[in-house]
Amino acid sequence: QMNRPAQAAAAAHTFFVANPGHQEMKQNLEYYQAMAGVREDDFTDLEAKPHLSEFRLGVRFYTEEQPAAAILHLEKALEEYFVADAECRALCEGPYDYEGYNYLEYNADLFQAITDHYMQVLSCKQGCVTELASQPGREKPLEDFLPSHFNYLQFAYYNNGNYEKAIECTKTYLLFFPNDEVMNQNLAYYTAVLGENLAGPIQPREEIQAYRQRSLMEKELLFFSYDVFGIPFVDPDTWTPEEVIPKRLREKQKVERETAARISEEIGNLMKEIETLVEEKAKESADMSKFIREGGPLVYEGASVTMNSKTLNGSQRVVVDGVLSAEECRELQRLTNAAASAGDGYRGKTSPHTPSETFYGVTVLKALKLGQEGKVPLQSAYLYYNVTEKVRHMMESYFRLEVPLHFSYSHLVCRTAIDEKQEGRSDNSHEVHVDNCILNAEALVCVKEPPAYTFRDYSAILYLNGDFEGGAFYFTELDAKTETAEVQPQCGRAVGFSSGSENPHGVKAVTKGQRCAIALWFTLDPRHSERERVQADDLVKMLFGTEEGDLLRETEPEQEPPAAVAVGKDEL
């Protein structure tokens, strides 16, 4: 508001550093970055702690393999650390903190009051370790922050060729962690390179020795008061030697840790049991709901269920016979042979799935257009259209779906065995796959992401004949090997199933003759409705009139044509 964008940028940046998830401030920063007159240098953290800023710079140069720059900033970070530490400790030297109005109830004698106050001051000073290692926007402080400076420095000095300083920093680090195997190995190496005569006299840094000694003395007093007076103390350091803690307190803490671990383990085991029970119940409930949901009426005379999920050893599976008459099957086969194109849907590849078979197909829209042009019998094309509608309604009803199915893709296809290529054949007509996810049989997972047709929800195959050898449809487990059910094609038989990972399936090799079927995929999402189907619906209405065109269709409210989507082929 005061037309000082540089200061505004700095203030916004400072707030965002401490609150990285704040979306409004993120937008403000983007706005300031685009403003004229605001430089990159203006985006500074006004509350940055100098020792932390220098430390981050040192670590950055260290990772970029610039040892000289890393040393400069890490040494500066140490200087700033002790300045901040002195300030933090000085601020602890205040009056006793009664925490609110508790002073009204505080009635300790002189010695207890002195003890309480002094222990509070010491505990506050020990807490400076956590205060100085805390970063804005981070929940936890940097662990072993002060010792880590010397971990970086010893290697930076080594890379810079300064073995004396490398040894000094290594010995300083070992003040905190004397049993660190890697650091002791580094020290032995540096000593061997420099020579024992020169390396031996080098001592850890004096200020760190004094810091450690003072810290240990404070810890001893705090642990003593914890043991004798019951004044709690939480040690902020991981490097504190065990002998600093009184034996009785160590034993007490050990018992507490063991008790906590046992309780944690028992709770963990109990949670696992509960999770297992919940999963089993959920699975049972899901399985039951699927079985309960299945079994709706087929809505057409002559059609009957011959196999359900139970007999097919799975879920959301059904085999229906009597969907077509023998004459209808023959008529649709003749349509395929008259209208189908080699490799239709596969860019003209005559044998897209196996070199041992040819593949011909025709879509509903193409058949209707050919019928309109008089190239194939129009009534045959219309039968093809109506049969697909029939299967759709049967699927909706049998699986008791609460929302309508929309066509994702429909294909009338024939696979024909190439006689001279059957000897020694070991492949399938179509390998095991899942219709809406990418099957990884080795890992027993099915990844539901593109290029899989993730929008597919239900699939169906309507067979037109059975006078060929091989070509059985089969379901498997996720391993694509363990067969759970097999269906032999025959005229008027339909297989319907959900398109997810619960139903991997394939087609065995057609070794003699021609296998013809209508493959259908459906989606519950109208946004993924097939564009060609919308055009086919319009063409049927134009050719046959609304009433006749809707002969086999339920009455539905008119909808606007859904958005077009790219559909893929995955014939069965």
Image (spheres, rainbow, N blue to C red):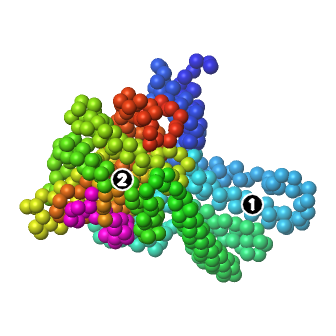
Q: Position of residue 428 (x, y in %)?
A: 22, 63
Q: Position of residue 210 (x, y in %)?
A: 56, 62
Q: Residues within 10 Å of mark 2 (few under 14, many from 20)?
A: many
Quarter holding residue 499:
bottom left
Give the quadrant of the N terminus: top right
Residue at the image position 22 percent from the left and 41 percent from the top: 339
Q: Secondary structure at mark 1?
A: helix
First in residue order: circle 1 vs circle 2? 1
Left or right: residue 516 versus residue 256 is: left
Nearest the viewer among 336 and 47 is 336
Quarter holding residue 383:
top left
Asked whether 265 falls inside the magenta stretch, the response is no
Residue position for label 2: 324
Left or right: residue 72 versus residue 249 is: left
Q: Position of residue 184 (x, y in %)?
A: 39, 71
Regarding residue 71, the answer to whether it shows in the image is no
The amino acid pointed to by label 1 is Gln
Q: Which mark is residue 120?
A: 1
Nearest the viewer among 550 and 430 is 550
Q: Position of residue 189 (x, y in %)?
A: 31, 69
Residue at the image position 30 percent from the left and 61 percent from the top: 489
Nearest the viewer among 203 and 85 is 85
Q: Nearer the viewer, mark 1 or mark 2?
A: 2
Q: Residues within 10 Å of mark 1 (few under 14, many from 20)?
A: many
Q: Secondary structure at mark 2?
A: loop
